[in-house]
Each structure stands twice: as structure tokens, then as C-alpha cells.
Amino acid sequence: MTETPRLVVGPFNRVEGDLEVHLDLAGGAVAEARVNSPLYRGFERMLEGKDPRDALTITPRICGICSISQSAAAARALGAAMGLEPTPQGAGMAALIHAVENVSDHLFHFNLFFMPDFIRPVYAGKPWFDRAVSRFTPAEGGAQRAAVAARAELMHILGLMAGKWPHTLAIQPGGVTRAPGSRDKVRIETTLRAFRRYLEEVVFGGSLEAFCAIETVDQLMAWEAGDAGLFLRIAADLDLDRLGRGSGRYMSFGAYPLAEGYGFGRGLWDGSLGAVDFGAITEDLSHAWMLGAQAHPWQGETRPDEAMRDAAYSWCKAPRLNGQTVETGALARQVVDGHPLARALAGGGVLARVAGRLLELARTQAFMEGLAKGIDPGAAFMVQGDLPEAGQGAGLVEAARGALGHWLRIEDGRIASYQIIAPTTWNFSPRDAEGVPGPLEAALVGAPVGEGETTPVSVQHIVRSFDPCMVCTVH
Amino acid sequence: MKVLWLQAAGCGGCTMSLLCAESPNVFDTLGGAGIEFLWHPTVSLETGAEVRAIFEAVESGEIALDVLAVEGSIARGPRGTGKFQMVSGTGRSMLDWVESLAPKARHVVAVGTCATYGGVTSAGGNPSDAVGVQYDGALPGGALPVEFRSISGLPVINVAGCPTHPDWVTETLLLLNEGALGAEDLDAFGRPLFYAKHLVHHGCSKNEFYEYKASAVELSDIGCMMENLGCIGTQAVGDCNIRPWNGDGSCTSGGYPCINCTAPEFEEPRHSFTETPKIAGIPVGLPTDMPKAWFMALASLSKAATPERIAKNAVADRVEVTPTIRKPKGRR
């Protein structure tokens, strides 16, 4: 038996942006993985010296899939520097706009990014194969076509309230730029009802409340209906929970900050729930083509190593919390928020991440319905404020893929420093100075590689289970 | 028609927008016309070695390529190497791949303002030394030289926008598929005239406020945003207020200014995006094709003539005063 000791996997598509994975193999499995984020654009540098308000126009354009998350983080960072909170109704509408994007991303990930891998010839002959082909063949499968149509219709809420998607300027430090009337409210409610019908008929094949009521992995695996049921059948057959297991350390910055608290709570889970020490976040540059010292984002800088030294292998910095890696994303959010099923899945692999996303999709629909019902067309949706000549503010939000932070410093009325750590920066970080691999690098160890596989399908399942956003990762 | 889609140094938002196409959905809109992706990074099955084989087959001429679509800027840095974006798994830069594949394509389409002119990726000192496929800002000549022509004889077709409206992309491809898009159908910056012959101002829901120069003072006011809030819809090409976005939307109907995202160098307006630069109280940028003296004369006249309803509503966040209802004169 001859074995390729080393594989380079790329172009790695059906992830957002550019990704290259280097694998060292031994005994028919991945022994070590190195994850390279091969695109550098330098958004943090672009922002230096600009009017702080321009962050609201520029940062959404870091990413076309989490554009609103970037808007929300920038608005919160500016607001913190201004000492300004959005009005309660403004915060509610910003949360609804943000939730529409996050839900769209989850839907998209499941149908267009993740599931198509099960139609590969390697699985021909599996009892579920024909069904997977009919549902998830790119551009042809029934699930794919239904998903793009449903997503486009759901986004009518964004046309109405955010002008367009991606790249809105609607979310501001003091709220949102457009005050909805009662007619907008009923329109939004109508759009959400149609989206619920789609989710219940197509994705879940049952009521969202029934899915959200699942508390154990056994109950989950017994869910047979809809495309979710097809996925669970495949997951059981391929033992996807054992594939690509995580550390079990999960972080959430708290999703959808409202006057009455977070939609999904904030915290750090490591077998028990604790607080996130935001002062204990650092970015390590030992294996990134970046110059400078390991630092907290308040002191951090972004100076690319144009020589691309051999000791490094990615443009991505390595964020650490208390010196440790953390996993972030939908599963992390649901674990931190305390959903019993998510807690039961904690530490799991491909199954846990994808099921966590499905769970959040179902839970967020109800959350959006509540926000829509709570719209008060007579209220103020925006409050004005003044930018300080000097100050700083952090905007910490939850994008679809996890914890997103913007750290802004203003001096002489201009942006003196703007540091961003995106969810996939955490998940797909390279090794740190201690040699500790990032979450994906660790999760890939042990992934089986079949004889002659050049682009191992197990590696694809694991990578895509994280739903990486590579354009955000390095920005 | 076979389309190979590359995502260069951009955000992927033009693809994300394209997938919002409606009536019918994106797959039916393109597929129904026989337009298929030879490979697209977001939707295609092929990964890794399979993709490398596709690239090589196009490069060698084994596969005839109808359209090379490029989304995102071309990063030339550091120091002209293109290494700020190495195409994963290939050991070659995006700059190198675009230079190699463009001459093999019947048409080259740059999708989005990053790909057309450099766009936001080239903002703020341009850290990655990014350019458009055939333009560097407003200057002809980008990753590909000024004289580049694809096999069809056309220059790079510049579907500008940040992001592009889904229909701008689908209709460009549909027109190419019908052989109905020629050099005469492009404007001076290579943008398809079917949307670039309009201004964002056309059909703007704030037109009545504009007529009277009844201006919004702060974001969330519903008045015209030209005078104070940086809106340049009267100069920006695009049919954004004729053909809505995501159902009913547009930037201006969403309550924020048009920032001229279809134009070269929109990313560096040299003032805050949401503030109108003025000299002696007069906005520096006047509506396209309008002589300054006339603008000033008409503006002062229309401001003086502004009905109270319009003046009040302009600085409110919703319609406070509704139009006066005239009872029909007449028969009963």
C-alpha cells in the first residue's frame, strides 16, 4: 500500500472565501492539519485615519455573507465610544434585521454548502443516496431550489427595513434608519409566516416547536421527517458525531442585545457555564504572516509580513481566550444559552455542529416572530448622538458563525486603531507560539483518508461542519 | 453557455446577492436559458483536485469557455507578486490565473465594483495593492491591459455595483447568451447601459422632497438626503429605484444615502460617506447635467415654495402630515 504522506486540499469551495488545508497522513488518517487562509485585504489598515462613521460603510464590505453582523458590530463599537445605546425599538429592529441574515446563512449552509457532499460517488449504494441526489444536487436538487427561493423571500424583510442585502447602512449606533409603520409590521409578519411554513414543510417536516423540544441525542436521532431527518439518517449511518469532535469549550458574546437582555445568552462553556473575560482575549502571531507581538485587540496591529516567513503558514492570526482555543458558532451559542439538546451534543463533531445550526434555525424563527409582534409603529427607532474627539468602544456581537468583535479607538476625531476578530478567526486559527493547533486543525486529526483520496471526503465534512467564513477570517 | 466564476479579492457579496434572484429563482433564471456554471465556488460540487482539473482544462483549451466571471479585486501585492491571494491548492496567485484564463474566454465579465475598478478592497491606502480586472479606479488598465479584448472582441464587461443587483448579473449573462450585448451596449466605463443609463435618483421615493430641497437633517429623517447626508443618487448610475432590491428595497428607501457604488473610486469620497461636502452652503456635487447657476436659482426658488406638509415631513421619521384631500367638485 502506497500512501501520500502529505496532501494539499484546495481550491476548497462551498465555504465562504478562500481556504487551503494541508494534511499530514499516517495509517490511513490525518495525523496533523494546517489551515491556511490565503487571502489578505487589510480592512483594519484601510480604516485608520478615517471618520469613525465610515466604519459603518466599510466594515460590512468585509463580508458578503455576514455583512449585517459586521454592521451590527461596527454600530455597537461606535455606540460604545459615543456612550449611546439604541432605542429599545431600534435595538429590536436591528436584532430582527440581523436575525434574518443569520437564519439565511444557516439555511444556505445546510442546503448549498454542507449537504451536497453526500451525493459524491463514494456514497453510491448507500440506502439514502438517491434521496440525497434528488434533494441536494447543486442547482438541480429540490431542496436547493426551495432554499434559494425561500431565502430570497425571507430577505424581503431586509428590502423593507434595511434597503438591500448585503451591505446596508440601516443599522446605526442609535438604532435603525427607517421607522416601520403598521403596514410594514403586517408585511414582516406575513413574510415570517411564509418562511415558517417552508421550514416546517421542507426543512423539518414537522413543527418547529416539536424540534425545539428535543432534549436528548436519542430523541434527535429519532427525528425522521424533512431534510433534517435525511441528514440525521445519514449522520447515524456514517457516525458523524465521532467525526471531527471538538474541545467542548464554547464561547458566545451574546446574540441580539435587546433592552431586556440577549436573545441568546453570553458566556463561556467548559463543562460548566462561566463569564467571558474580554480582557483575556489575545491574538498570537507566531504562525501568521503578521508582524508584531501577541496582543489584546486594544493594542493589536495588522502589519503583514510581506516576506511570508517560512515559520508561518496563514494570514490568519491565532486568537486565544485565557491562552486557550475556543469553538464558536451556532452550537456554541445554543450550548451557552443552555438548550438541553445543545448541552447533550457538547464536545461533538460534525453531527453536533450541524444539528446545533438546525436547532438554532428553528429557535430563531420563533425569536423573529416575537420581535415582529413587538414592533411598536409609534415608537422612536433612532436616537442621535455625538462622536467623541477621543475614546474607544468594543462591538461584540454574534454572527451566524459565532463571536465577532470590533475594537475601535478614536483619537483627534479619527480612527486611530480598528481591530477585528471574526468567528472563523477563532475556529480556523493556525497554531500559537505553544504549538497548540486551532479548533479545526485539532478536529481534523484522526479523520479517515481512503486509499487514493486526493480530497478526502471526511475532511470536507469536518471543514464544512464549521461553516467557515474565510473572507471575515483575515479581512 | 458555460461560466467559470472566480472569487478574487472581494467579499463574495455579489454572489450572495445573485442568489437572491427572483421570478424565477437564480437556478431557474440561468439554467432555463442553458447557462450553467462550469464551476462556481459557492454552488458547485467539485472541490480540490477536481477544481484544479477544470482550471487546467480551460487553460489548455480542452474546455471551451464562454464566460469568465471575476468577482472581487485582483490583489497585486505584496510587491507585485500577487501573493496576497494565492489560489488555494494551485500554488499560483489569482493575478496569474486571471491573466492566464481571460484570453481563453469568449467573454470576460467583472462582477461588482471590486472586480470592475478596485472598489472597497482598494480603499484606504489599498493595503493589498488591488485593482480591477481592466481598470485601476477610473484609469483604464488593471490586472489586464487597456488593449485586452476577449475572444468575442469585447473589452471586460463591467457589471459594477457594491453589491451588484442580482438582475444586473443575470441579465448581462442572458444578453450575452443571446448575442445581444455588444460594445455599443456599454457606457464609457464598460458598464451595461441597460441599468447604467438610469440614475439612482430616477424613481426615488424621496423625489417630492428633492423637488423642494426639503432636506433630511439626520439619518432617520425621511426628507431628501442630498443636501446634508451625502446622497449622490442624482449623479450615480443605476436603476435601484426603478427595479427594487430584495422585494421592495433600495438604499434611499431604507433611509440612508446612495454612495454611488457603481462608480470607480466611490470607496474614497474624501469626506464621510453620510455627510455632504459644501462650499458656502452649496453642495459640491451637483446633479448630473445640471448647470450650477440653474441649480442655485431653482433651489432657492423651490425652498421658498416648499409646502408646509413637505417641510415638516422632511425632518420627521415618518409622514406626520398627509396630503390635503380635495373633494371633487360636482354632481352631488
Image: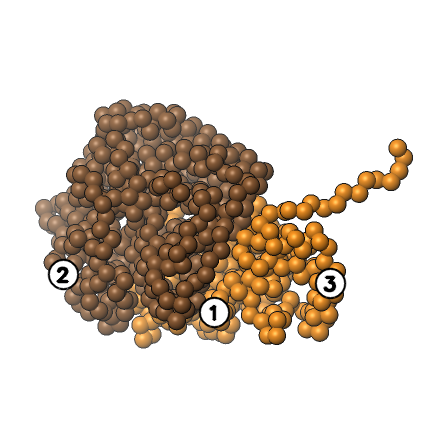
Chain colours: A brown, B orange
* Label 2 neighbour load within 10 Å: few <14, some 14-19, many 20+: few
Picture coordinates of residue A125, whole percent (x, y): 27, 31
Query: Closer to the camera: disc 2 or disc 3?
Result: 3
Q: Please give the chain letter of the residue carrying mark 3.
A: B
Please tell me whether residue A281 is drawn above or below residue A328 in the rendered image. below
Q: Nearer the viewer, residue B124 or B155?
A: B124
* Label 1 neighbour load within 10 Å: few <14, some 14-19, many 20+: some
The answer as to whether the residues below labels 2 and 1 share one chain is: no
Residue with the mark numbered 2: A433
Q: Amino acid at mark 3?
A: Ala
Residue sitting at x 44%, y 58%:
A56
Residue with the mark numbered 1: B268
Q: Is residue B91 left or right of residue B147?
A: left
Marked residue nearer the N-terminal end (1 or 3): 1
Picture coordinates of residue A323, whole percent (x, y): 16, 54
Q: Secondary structure at mark 2?
A: loop
Q: Nearer the viewer, residue B103 or B169?
A: B169
Picture coordinates of residue A147, whole percent (x, y): 43, 38
Residue sitting at x 46%, y 58%:
A385
Residue sitting at x 43%, y 67%:
A51
Real-space CA distance between mark 1 and mark 3, rounded to the nearest whole angstrom? 34 Å
Residue with the mark numbered 3: B304
Q: Quadrant of the C terminus of chain B?
A: top right
Q: Amino acid at mark 2?
A: Ala
Q: Please give the chain letter of the residue carrying mark 2.
A: A
Q: Which mark is residue A116?
A: none
Q: Please give the chain letter of the residue carrying mark 1.
A: B
